Image: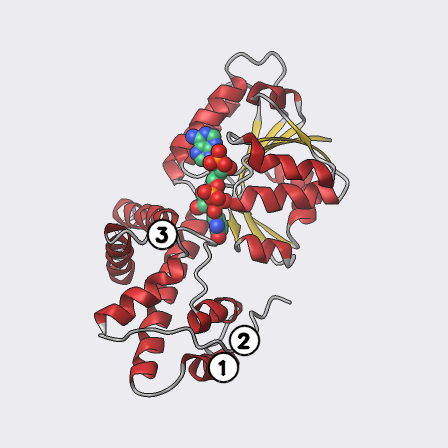
């Protein structure tokens, strides 16, 4: 099948790159064309305008928010004569946005798989990304060979928008875990334990995880090159809090973490990785962090 790919940001670039490297016929469009151009070296074709993608069999989408998804879908489909058989939408968006997209696509006879992901660009490169999918099972089965080219793990959790709530819960957990790890790391350091020694123990303990391991280089050496921005994390925590209101579930830790992420953003900490929550925590504790310059594993090799 021919593939269209919308969005070559941090995530979309690496995901489309895996399809192209795997030999798929991929036509990529990105709003900022220059960011997509290096994908041509991997075998992808770069589209000049979005409507070119409408004639593809399957179109993947990986942009930022529901507003952006809506804009790109309209721009692709509004005047299209031929439309894709299947759209696979991977951005982290709300249940409501996803429902509206399903209606919009159904009106044009297009099947739709909601397929958000877990993992950052480095995780994709390491071949450790995972998809959580919902929508018609036959659409999932048709998409599976392509999903597997991008990520080894792809779960189908049911019909409709169920994948969206799974992803929202996942990212609420991501925010809360990162804040909690920042708190205990600063506590241990202020009491005299170097961060690399503390995290070495944590990573080998039952509390250690793929996530604590791959955030360890950032925490130890203060390399906050962005993997996921504070604004995108705030979006996901807000989606979690909205879902909490809708389903009448209190989320006290998520609520507090959302405000801490807001504090980062209010202080202008927007351009680096969200794991700068560590820096915010250190400031609140009167601790001046310094890079430890210790070589530590990220567990992804
Ligand atoms: N980074 C992560 O670790 C991670 C992990 C899992 C899920 N996610 C989710 O994946 C999505 C993408 O994240 P990312 O980190 O790849 O973000 P990113 O690097 O900021 O990339 C965003 C992409 O969306 C495009 N875009 C945004 N608004 C647009 C619009 N109105 N019209 C057309 N294109 C638009 C951007 O185009 P330009 O290049 O022209 O700006 C870019 O290609 C988000 O929903 C995020 O929550 C991220």
Q: Give me the residue at 57% from left, 73% from top.
A: 297
The residue identified by callout 2 is 296
Instruction: State the CA–CA distance, disc 2 to disc 3.
Output: 24 Å
User: In the image, 25: left or right of 281?
Assistant: right
Q: Residue at x 53, y 12 (%)?
A: 79
Q: Can residue 69 be seen by looking at this rendering?
A: no
Disc 3: which residue: 230
Sequence-earlier tag: 3 or 1:
1
Q: Is residue 301 left or right of residue 73?
A: right
Residue 8, x across and y down, in percent: 56, 38
Residue 272 higher or lower than 3, as above or below: below
Q: Residue 20's image quarter? A: top right
Q: Quadrant of the C terminus?
A: bottom right
Foreground residue, 243 or 301? 301
Instruction: Bin the neighbour count of mark 1 within 10 Å (Cα to Cα): few under 14, some 14-19, many 20 and up.
Output: some
Residue 44, compared with residue 200, is above or below; it is above
Check if mark 2's residue and mark 1's residue have beta carbons within 8 Å.
yes
Depth order, front residue of 247/175? 175
Q: Mark 2 vs mark 3: which is more N-terminal?
A: 3
Q: Could you tell me which secondary element the residue under label 2 belongs to? A: loop
Q: Earlier in the sequence, mark 2 or mark 1?
A: 1
């Amino acid at each position: 099948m021919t593939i269209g790919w919308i969005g070559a940001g941090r995530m979309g670039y690496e995901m489309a790159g895996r399809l192209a490297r795997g030999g798929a016929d991929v036509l990529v469009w990105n709003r900022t064309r220059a960011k997509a151009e290096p994908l041509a070296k991997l075998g992808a074709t770069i589209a000049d305008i979005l409507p070119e993608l409408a004639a593809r069999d399957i179109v993947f989408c990986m942009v930022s928010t529901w507003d952006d998804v809506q804009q790109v879908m309209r721009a692709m489909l509004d005047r299209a004569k031929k439309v894709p058989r299947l759209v696979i939408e991977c951005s982290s968006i709300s249940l409501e946005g996803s429902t509206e997209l399903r209606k919009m696509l159904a009106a044009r006879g297009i099947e739709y798989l909601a397929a958000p992901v877990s993992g950052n660009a480095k995780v994709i490169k390491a071949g450790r990304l995972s998809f959580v999918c919902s929508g018609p099972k036959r659409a999932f089965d048709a998409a599976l060979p392509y999903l597997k080219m991008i990520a080894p793990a792809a779960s189908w959790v049911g019909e409709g928008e169920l994948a969206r709530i799974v992803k929202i819960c996942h990212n609420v957990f991501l925010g809360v875990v990162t804040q909690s790890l920042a708190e205990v790391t600063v506590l241990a350091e202020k009491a005299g334990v170097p961060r690399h020694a503390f995290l070495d123990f944590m990573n080998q303990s039952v509390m250690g995880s793929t996530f604590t391991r791959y955030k360890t280089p950032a925490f130890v050496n203060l390399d906050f090159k962005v993997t996921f921005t504070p604004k995108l994390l705030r979006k996901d925590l807000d989606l979690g809090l909205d879902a909490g209101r809708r389903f009448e579930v209190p989320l006290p830790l998520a609520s507090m973490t959302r405000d801490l992420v807001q504090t980062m953003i209010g202080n202008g900490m927007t351009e680096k990785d969200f794991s700068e929550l560590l820096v915010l925590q250190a400031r609140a504790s009167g601790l001046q962090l310094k890079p430890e310059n210790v070589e530590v594993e990220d567990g992804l090799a």
